[in-house]
Image: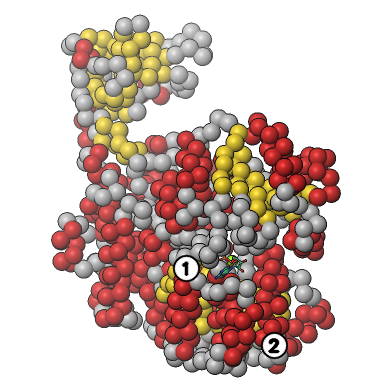
Amino acid sequence: MRPEVLFPLFAPIRSLSGIGPRLEKLVEKLAGPKVVDLCWHLPVGLVDRRRRPKIAEARDGEIATMEIQVGLHVPPRLKRLPYRVHVHDETGEMQIVFFNVHGDYLAKAMPEGSTRVVSGKVEFYQGQPQMTHPDHIVAPEELASLPLLEPIYPLTAGVTLKPLQKAIRAALDRVPELPEWQDGPWLKARGFGPWRSSLMAAHMPDSFEELDPDAPARARLAFDELLANQLALGLVRLRMRRLPGRVVEGDGHLRAKVTAALPFALTGAQVRALAEIDADMVSDRRMLRLLQGDVGSGKTVVALLAMLTAVEAGFQAAMMAPTEILARQHHASLVPLCEAAGVKLELLSGREKGARRAAILQALATGEIDILVGTHALFSEDVAFKALALAVVDEQHRFGVHQRLQLQSKGGTGTDILVMTATPIPRTLTLTAYGDMDVSKLTEKPAGRKPVDTRALPLERLDEIVDGLHRALARGAQVYWVCPLVEESEDLDVTAAEDRYNSLQTIFGDTVGLVHGRMKAAEKDTAMARFEAGETRILVATTVIEVGVNVPTATVMVIEHAERFGLAQLHQLRGRVGRGADKSSCLLLYQTPLGETAAARIKIMRETEDGFRIAEEDLRLRGAGELLGTRQSGLPTFRLADVERQGDLLAAAYDDARMILDRDPELESERGKALRVLLYLFERDEAIRYLRSG
Ligand code: ADP
Ligand code: MG
């Protein structure tokens, strides 16, 4: 249960004065639905109103705060013309200008003959200073209420600064004192203050320097957030560890058969990763391991060999893929190897229905099936294994932590988990998302891979590309032609792909195939199968082929509107070629004019095929939050911390979390109790459930 002291922060924003139904919706989109979300909405700039010139000293374009005497009001003759108020001080005269003045507002705000302090932007018009719509108009005795340094917040269409400032001030008024969860000496060493005053200072900076993420107030808040993240991951990890694992020890007889059937020798990296996995499986603790390897580094075969160990030991194994195509492809590629070893392999996706499905479930429950490959259909209630010892999750970035836990629960006692990701994730992000997992890396690619020749061309040169395709096809090449996602509309990108398919078909005839996300599963299979068999030679596709698809004979990748793709995605797509013996190429077709970021992405693609370097560059270009499309990736988003810039804070949070959980795994000490509040504050409630007295 959330501690009561936090209740005011988790009230809906509509409970704040000044937030009506209209503003509520907009602010909710901008910051979030709760009071605490407004607290995390930090200023990005400051309006500096400290300059206090006399009229004669005012400069064109500056923000100034000026004490003036109000003179004559001159209402407009026509509605659309401005309302002018003449003002003066001992040095000169100026005009305050208003449009669309309603009622007697101005007569009240600045009555003739009164003294007022106005603050706003000075502009010169025909040599005369004037101020249009001052931001503040106050009487001299109210001067204290005029913020001389005013925070500027990120805005969205329909929300202006003033009401947002007001709402945030109201939110800050609700902020309680909370027990200190950080280590006192550490705070001191860093020059950090208490949480509440840090939050206030972050919203009311006294200088531009204090807007810097490394300024003490902001850094403290960022550290709090990172610690909550690391602590939550640490708690999940502890719980996993606490659950007993199984000792799974194979005798190697199946592995020997499959290895003999492989047309290649394992790379050193594959051998090392397998040894790490074996050691985990044979121990009586449960395995929670991430197998990280760039596209084409050969993760699948590592997974298969690990699954064979489970089968050798008399257990079952499962492998889950994020898409139907990928699940089918894994199944198809594993069938011959499993047959060679006499291992029973089955496929389960949303498409196995009725009697067929019942038969599979039956065989699974009796233990007749050794290895089950599938989609998230593996999560269904009625799927029950006889003895699941190892669950492999492929292409992890499509799944979140929840699903990981869910699959694990299928195993009953102590199922080992191996998560595979093809997306190279920079070290800092690995820590934030997988701080709870051990990591094996495939750092070396199978021998014989040829570099992919990557070129970039403007879309206007489509004719040349078509000519090039004629030549490539004459040489026997197979081609992927990828059409982009159209602004979040699946229908539109399907249309784009269909249009391209039609236009290529008029040129290349029946050798052109099409696959996209809206096709029926069986149609997708057929399209993929025909391409794999070489019946179609050009496969027009949406990004459904982004993840994992393996057709080694394909050697040309055309990416249309490459400027619309992220770096990680381009890298994934390019990874579909360069898998066989022949030389491959990748054509990035872009729309001119090319924006700066898109140009930088394309340049990096041309420079390197190193997935880790590409991921680092991606992080630099886009920022951590956006990398991989955070939402679907299961990677955490941070409201306050910038993991790219604040790697040192992240490392400190990682160490701190480990130390805390070593000493006080149930968070029962004084500091432990305060840390529970921290977890709730950052909505890591999930993690609290893992505590005995959560
Ligand atoms: P990914 O890591 O992207 O999932 P895959 O497992 O799909 O990569 O492997 C890509 C290709 O490399 C497959 O055709 C696979 O058979 C092949 N492969 C895997 N390991 C090796 C190896 N040691 N030597 C040569 N080819 C390999
Ligand atoms: Mg793969």
Instruction: Give residue 231's position: percent from left, percent from top.
Output: 35, 71
Residue at screen point 24% across, 49% down: 215
Quarter of the rendering occupied by the C terminus: bottom left
Instruction: Give residue 354's position: percent from left, percent from top.
Output: 82, 78
Q: Please determine whether, in this image, residue 252 is positioned above or below residue 85.
A: below
The tag on residue 313 is none
Residue at screen point 64% across, 34% down: 459
Residue type for callout 1: Leu
Instruction: Give residue 663's position: percent from left, percent from top.
Output: 26, 81
Residue type for callout 2: Gly
Closer-to-camera residue (12/40): 40
Local SS, label 1 = strand
Q: Which residue is mark 1?
A: 442
Q: Residue furthest top?
A: 126
Closer-to-camera residue (471/642): 471
Q: Which residue is mark 2?
A: 342
Closer-to-camera residue (293/57): 293
Asked if the residue at label 1 sits under 8 Å from ligand 1, the reply is yes
Q: Quadrant of ligand 1?
A: bottom right
Label 1 environment density (alpha carbons within 10 Å; few <14, some 14–19, many ≥20): many
Residue 359 appears left or right of 403: right
